[in-house]
């Protein structure tokens, strides 16, 4: 026997109420009929409320109205939930709206009625069942395989590669695919590259400094390695206080040829970076371009340049465009590492910076100006046979102001 029975009909309940009004006791009726005495008492009380002789509760009409309003409220809340969850996925007028609607319905069919979702998303239930029972098309299968490779490339870059570099990496692997297709798959998978924020200036010019002439004039181009270096320094925030990084970058290949890190920003830090570059590259008459920071205009730094045959060059005061290539490197460092990491100690920062510079930036990171090659790979190409279109000049704007890095 089932645990519950169908509700008693209105006629049956009215007859029980009439028997009570005729003088029968609910306890006696409960022994003769199926309902309990308490149920019969409840029917009698409700009949009196409906007749207006009792005022301690709602009438049957009011109960029905309340039930209807609660049902409508539940329906509206459910519809609002569905629209809120699907708004970012389903866009009316989009040619992919139907497929996206079906995907949403499949993911939420255990929670919401299919008929309600179909009505709100403006798709048909029959279309959903046909789509759900259909085997994936060859293009969908290829998209899934391609997305696996895209995820691998994006993960290898620690989540820093956007559409251009992911597309270039696929082409380097021999996978011929359109850039817009890569953009679509990354967008649908929620994959995006790192964005460059504004960088904070750390340049402090000495009041009596005698800066070198500007030999670059914002035209950052070199036809071979060790013709033009750019240098600068920045700070690294850690819980133990600021840590500082000085770099020397070869304009020809964008490779960091010298770097130094310490907990101070004195001239010795820039000298360490320059000494590393000199020891690795052994240049002859290379131009060393920097800003007019007091470290670069110091007597010690100028003397080291003269001893090594380095030609110093310096931009104007307070204009980041005059050292735009080095500023661009620091912007890349910030968006790909600093904004995504938190360092407890200086040692943690040093290890992370070393790994990023030598283990990623110089050896693996693809540069659009190098034909989507890494600096190390680009330097292995023959200099005379280089395609100029793959290494276009990096010329900063002629107007003043701070660049968007």
Image (tube, rainbow, N blue to C red):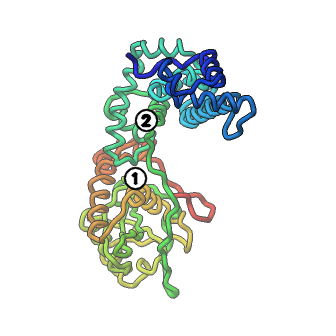
Question: 204 or 7, which is in the foreground?
Answer: 7
Residue drawn 31% across the image and 57% down it: 356
Q: Quadrant location of residue 232?
A: bottom left
Mark 1 lies on residue: 223
Question: 299 or 323, which is in the foreground?
Answer: 323
Is residue 382 something one can see in this rendering?
Answer: no
Is residue 255 something one can see in this rendering?
Answer: yes
Q: Is residue 376 above or below residue 30?
A: below
Which badge, 1 or 2, comes first in the chain's sequence? Answer: 2
Residue drawn 51% across the image and 24% down it: 28
Q: Is residue 390 above or below residue 174?
A: below
Q: Which mark is residue 361?
A: none
Question: 274 or 283, which is in the foreground?
Answer: 274
Q: Is residue 357 left or right of residue 23?
A: left
> Mark 2 packing: few (<14 Cα in 10 Å), some, or many (20+)?
few
Residue drawn 56% across the image and 27% down it: 25
As drawn, the residue found furthest toward the right would be: 52
Q: Quadrant location of residue 316?
A: bottom right
Mark 2 lies on residue: 189
Secondary structure beneath dot 2 equals helix
Secondary structure beneath dot 1 equals loop
Q: Position of residue 216 (x, y in %)?
A: 49, 64
Q: Position of residue 38 (x, y in %)?
A: 52, 31
Q: Position of residue 210 (x, y in %)?
A: 49, 83
Residue drawn 32% across the image and 38% down it: 152
Q: Is residue 73 above or below residue 315?
A: above
């Amino acid at each position: 026997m089932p645990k519950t029975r169908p509700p008693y009909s209105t006629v049956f309940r009215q007859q029980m109420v009439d028997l009570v009004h005729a003088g029968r006791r609910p306890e006696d009726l409960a022994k003769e009929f199926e309902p309990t005495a308490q149920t019969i008492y409840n029917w009698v009380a409700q009949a009196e409320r409906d007749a207006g002789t009792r005022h301690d509760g709602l009438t049957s009409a009011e109960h029905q109205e309340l039930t209807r309003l609660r049902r409508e409220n539940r329906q509206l809340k459910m519809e609002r939930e569905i629209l809120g969850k699907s708004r970012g996925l389903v866009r009316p007028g989009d040619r992919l709206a139907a497929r996206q609607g079906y995907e949403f319905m499949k993911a939420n069919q255990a929670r919401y009625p299919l008929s309600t979702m179909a009505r709100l998303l403006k798709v048909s239930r029959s279309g959903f069942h046909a789509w759900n029972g259909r085997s994936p098309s060859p293009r969908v299968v290829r998209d899934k395989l391609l997305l696996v490779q895209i995820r691998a490339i994006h993960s290898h870059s620690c989540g820093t590669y956007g559409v251009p570099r992911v597309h270039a990496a696929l082409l380097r692997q021999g996978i011929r695919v359109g850039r817009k297709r890569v953009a679509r798959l990354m967008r649908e998978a929620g994959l995006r590259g790192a964005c460059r924020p504004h960088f904070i200036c750390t340049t402090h010019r000495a009041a009596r400094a005698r800066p070198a002439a500007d030999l670059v004039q914002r035209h950052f181009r070199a036809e071979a390695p060790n013709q033009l270096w750019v240098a600068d320094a920045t700070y690294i925030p850690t819980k133990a206080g600021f840590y500082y990084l000085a770099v020397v970058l070869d304009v020809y290949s964008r490779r960091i040829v010298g770097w130094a890190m310490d907990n101070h920003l004195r001239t010795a830090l820039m000298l360490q970076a320059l000494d590393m570059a000199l020891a690795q590259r052994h240049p002859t008459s290379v131009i060393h371009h920097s800003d007019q920071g007091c470290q670069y205009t110091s007597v010690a730094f100028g003397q080291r340049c003269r001893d090594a045959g380095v030609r110093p060059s310096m931009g104007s005061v307070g204009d980041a465009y005059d050292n735009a290539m080095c500023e661009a490197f620091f912007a890349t460092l910030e968006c790909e590492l600093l904004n995504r990491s938190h360092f407890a100690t200086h040692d943690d920062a040093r290890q992370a910076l070393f790994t990023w510079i030598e283990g990623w930036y110089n050896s693996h990171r693809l540069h659009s100006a190098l034909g989507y090659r890494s600096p190390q790979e680009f330097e292995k190409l023959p200099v005379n046979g280089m395609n100029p279109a793959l290494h276009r000049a990096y010329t900063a704007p002629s107007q003043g102001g701070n660049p968007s890095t």
